[in-house]
Image: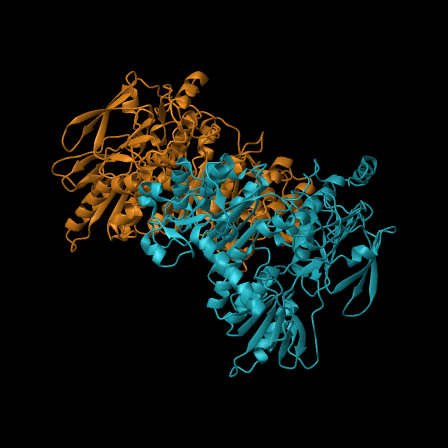
Chain colours: A orange, B cyan
């Protein structure tokens, strides 16, 4: 929503652009007064940008907690001792923000009400209990997220802590310090999302035995099962007791009880379950919420009240894949949207010559480290696309991060979803080591720019053998997308294989005999690629499926057979993807029967 | 150039798509016959793609050298022992290519002539001296590059070797083995380009003392001087004797003589000077060359003869910045264009349903490792833009690869050139450690997609503290580009500072007193940012220039002063860029006076 131009102009006319005020003094009647609720990522980005645009503005930040502008994404790593100094997490203080940006930052202030008619907010000082009402010209809501479920608590039970504030981390530190070192300490982590995995890794790093409890069928629900399979492997490799398909239903004096009836011993419980928008203040003020439960905003982060903006985890975003309202709780978006809201206000008050561009739709790019693994994703998963009934092609590859002939190359698993009608990239998932972050960023950039997947083949990415391959993994994805679109190749997904074989298709493993002997798909016959041309005439009739280790030799095999007039499909991602998917399916079966 | 449709259709009609021939046998009158000259990157990409498209085609590859499809970008690393096994460099052999792709690969065949009328090539076997003439339906020229200058040689002088083939590496290995270990061995490397730097690093790794001789004023000529400054530092840190502004003019019994008169001792000389297109065969055949001296081709890699394609380092590309013909000698482009030429032939012969898209203009993305440094670039430099009289804005930043609060963050120097009219990115240079390759790839993707520089701010790049920052370095570049475009900020380049100060501008260093004492720009006054608001009234009149360490505090300072009505510019890239540029200038002065 855009304010009527006349009103905007009247605001512009009410103040001098050339004024040189010293913040907090003088000409108060001329200064724009902005109140920001929430002083971490989105709120503080808005505040500092506002100051750089408008030296005369009065900018008040109310923060509920004791700290502002702290490194919330670093909290788990302070628990693990990776970030040694607690002070490293405190990027700014109210005093430093006053000195540098002339901000009026007030911590431990719980904003309890907004009077949109009077343009005031009321805040309660949580130390003294006193309340205060402050007027605004503009209000920016940046309250962030709040746990969707109540954290369980019982008097005679282990402490249950979220990992969302400096105070949370202090509490975990105290609990860990209080544990008798002689006893092997145990922890339960509720939720195997991003924070849950980071908490798990860092508790293991501190020497605790960790049980990780996940409601879904696999860790990191946004991943598809075969892509989550190496995540489960990595957890197992580090001794983590992963319990999927279950939840914590209660606390006991010695730990927790799970929904499957199991009791798990724990001296500490981390609640890392889902977060929703902290929108209650907006609701109480009669501001419109969107279908996702977040505060509804237009492309310029404005709520249905032209004087009120909402940014960060409390506000809705527009999903890049569906164009529908959605929630994406990422620090990058929070910072970006906070700054963008400041630009809108800066424009309306005459401090920018042009209005800022509307927000780009949200891709949901995310990354997490887990021991030696890096897991990154963007856009939608195959599961989500299937559930939404949205047509898609799937590409699995297993490239190395750099040229195989240069030492130290690490293999990653890569999956890309493509819209068969437009050719656009709908989502991607990458799991591996080095080079995963680079590839997800390039894909996110390609999605932002709406490059078709096949266009990835044309990207001129930097190549030297220690950094990449002459045909980068993303170039290869582009070639595969092109081959699928042009009909040069036809593929089959790992989960489609059983039905195809049941229908009579012959599965040909074109790897070497050594590879075949080291592990093969049941029912496959081994005809190495280099001998395939000689064996074509001896093949049984009917549909053929070929596969190799990762998909590349399979592609060549499929081309040979297709040109001999055979109906043939290449098993996408080869043996490695099939193996990961099959393991994932087996794990679900084991959990269900346990 | 596109062949007339009637002719294309007649080729399509002349063969059966459904044939299932075994390569090299039968139906020769129906098979398309393709000859490829050159069997490394471009040629072999064309050959293998052709086979996947057309099982019946006869595909003959003539390679001048003894090896095909070898890892030419790995050659320096085998010299240094990083790639231990020589066999790792040999990715394919004629035999393996016959088995897998039914290719007829002939090594040590020097193609001496093309008869375009008769559609034949004549090749001379360099072992036997016999010549052979072969007919083609299509000819793909992929001869690669050739040294621009003759490698010096003298009987009683150290061996001079290029690093372009397996044979070259074998020769270097032999020389190194022959050197008496007791004596400190010395080498001269001619040319401080990509290969020259890689050769230098690897000879140092082998224990040699290296003198690196560079005609230009600094190593890596495509870099601007202040960006090359850390490269010179890194060479010095590893004991390399860098001689700029000079060339090797002759060999002596004990080493080389330089154009500045100096004699340098060496038992081995590596010639890593410039490479040009190996176009003599095309010239002799009357094919058109372009203004760059490369074989002229259209967007589909076709020469002015519709039956002849040219790809790789021998062929011209279209420059993405100027849209003019250019030479870009990168393995990625060679591979891509080889495959694309195969697609054009595949389409014309009925094996693809749609014609391939025209080639994307070349960006010239490149990367090189040098000891602990990674240097990457794309597009044009500031120097090149200035020389071409092309308007541009410049942005320097010094971000860390990941969040500063997470251990191990490494600082990089980043420079981006922007078209002030279109806002498009014209070029970028990045020098640092971890994370350099990621950022150049994202910029290359943004350039490919023609995203304006300011749009980098909107990229949703993956953030967790060990991988990036919530505001990624590229987001920050986007914000700076936006601030420059909108007039929110005005900057000054390091090389513009002396003139501005001579004209009476006051230079204010807004860093802390500790930073100022640790090294400051002569003539600057220190007013720390956090006290600037109180000191505005005491500032002298006239133009102001502010600076900090990297540019960020300077931006805030400039905003404060601008809103007080002062004419103020922020020194782009801060003290670090000024220091790098000044060092580069001093080095040139020292070399000139030496």
Image coords of residue B278 (percent x, y): 73, 58
Quarter occupied by residue A156: top left
Q: Is residue B416 left or right of residue A25?
A: right
Quarter occupied by residue B67: bottom right
Up-down relation of residue A355 to residue A427 (above or below): above
For the question of whether residue A521 can be seen, the reply is: no
Image coords of residue A522 (percent x, y): 49, 46
Image coords of residue A235 (percent x, y): 34, 48
Residue A344 or residue B509, whichever sits in front: B509
Q: Is residue A59 left or right of residue B289?
A: left
For the question of whether residue A492 can be seen, the reply is: yes
Image coords of residue A73 (percent x, y): 33, 43
Residue A287 or residue B427, whichever sits in front: B427
Q: Is residue A456 left or right of residue A273?
A: right
Quarter occupied by residue A491: top right
Residue A417 or residue B583, whichever sits in front: B583
**Residue at point 64%, 66% (across, down):** B166
Up-down relation of residue B181 to residue A512 (above or below): below
Q: Given the current orientation, which residue lies at the most extreme right position?
A: B117
Up-down relation of residue B425 to residue A325 (above or below): below
Q: Given the current orientation, which residue lies at the most extreme left position?
A: A156
Q: Quadrant of the N terminus of chain A?
A: top left
Q: Quadrant of the C terminus of chain A?
A: top left
**Residue at point 33%, 23% (across, down):** A137
Up-down relation of residue B556 to residue B401 (above or below): above
């Amino acid at each position: 929503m855009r304010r009527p131009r006349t009103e905007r102009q009247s605001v512009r006319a009410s103040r001098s652009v050339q004024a040189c005020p010293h913040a907090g003094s003088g000409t108060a009647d001329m200064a724009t007064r902005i109140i920001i609720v929430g002083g971490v990522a989105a709120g503080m980005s808005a505040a500092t940008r506002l100051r750089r645009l408008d030296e005369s503005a009065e900018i008040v930040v109310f923060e509920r907690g004791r700290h502002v502008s702290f490194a919330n994404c670093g909290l788990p790593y302070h628990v693990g001792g990776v970030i040694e100094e607690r002070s490293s997490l405190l990027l700014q203080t109210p005093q430093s923000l006053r000195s540098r940006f002339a901000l009026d930052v007030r911590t431990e202030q719980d904003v309890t009400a907004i009077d949109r008619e009077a343009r005031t907010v009321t805040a309660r000082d949580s130390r003294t209990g006193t309340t205060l009402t402050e007027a605004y010209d503009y209000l920016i809501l940046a309250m962030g997220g709040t746990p969707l479920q109540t954290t369980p608590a019982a008097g005679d039970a282990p402490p249950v802590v979220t990992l969302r504030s400096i105070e949370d981390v202090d509490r975990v530190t105290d609990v860990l310090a209080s544990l008798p070192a002689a006893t092997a300490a145990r922890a339960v982590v509720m939720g195997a999302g991003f924070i849950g995995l980071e908490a798990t890794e860092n508790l293991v790093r501190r020497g605790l035995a960790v049980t990780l409890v996940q409601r879904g069928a696999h860790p990191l629900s946004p991943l598809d099962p075969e892509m989550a399979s190496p995540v489960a492997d990595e957890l197992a490799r580090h001794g983590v007791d992963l319990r999927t398909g279950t939840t914590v239903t209660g606390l006991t004096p010695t730990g927790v009880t799970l929904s499957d009836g199991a009791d798990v011993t724990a001296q500490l419980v981390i609640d890392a379950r889902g977060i929703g928008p902290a929108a209650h203040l907006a609701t109480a003020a009669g501001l419109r919420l969107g279908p996702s439960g977040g505060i509804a905003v237009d492309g310029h982060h404005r709520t249905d009240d032209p004087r009120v903006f909402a940014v960060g985890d409390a506000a809705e975003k527009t999903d890049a894949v569906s164009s529908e309202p959605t929630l994406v709780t990422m620090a990058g978006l929070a910072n970006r949207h906070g700054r963008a809201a400041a630009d809108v206000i800066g424009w309306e008050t005459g401090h920018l010559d042009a209005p800022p561009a509307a927000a780009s739709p949200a891709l949901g790019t995310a990354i997490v480290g887990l021991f030696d693994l890096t897991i990154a994703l963007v856009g939608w998963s195959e599961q989500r696309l299937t559930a939404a009934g949205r047509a898609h092609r799937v590409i699995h590859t297993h490239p190395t991060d750099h040229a195989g002939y240069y030492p130290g190359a690490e293999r990653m698993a890569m999956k890309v979803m493509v819209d068969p009608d437009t050719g656009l990239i709908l989502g991607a998932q990458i799991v591996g080591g080095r080079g995963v972050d680079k590839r997800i960023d390039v894909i996110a950039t390609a999605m932002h720019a709406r490059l078709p997947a096949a266009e990835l083949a044309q990207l001129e990415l930097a190549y030297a053998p220690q950094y990449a391959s002459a045909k980068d993994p993303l170039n290869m994805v582009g070639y595969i997308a092109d081959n699928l679109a042009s009909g040069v190749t036809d593929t089959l997904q790992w989960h489609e294989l059983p039905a195809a074989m049941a229908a009579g298709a012959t599965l040909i493993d074109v790897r070497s005999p050594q590879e075949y002997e080291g592990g093969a798909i049941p029912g496959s016959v081994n005809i190495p690629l280099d001998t395939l041309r000689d064996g074509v005439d001896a093949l049984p009739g009917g549909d053929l499926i070929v596969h190799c280790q990762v998909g590349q030799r399979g592609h060549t095999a499929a081309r040979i057979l297709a040109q001999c007039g055979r109906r043939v499909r290449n098993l996408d991602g080869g043996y490695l993807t099939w193996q990961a998917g099959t393991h994932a399916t087996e794990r679900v079966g084991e959990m269900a029967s346990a």
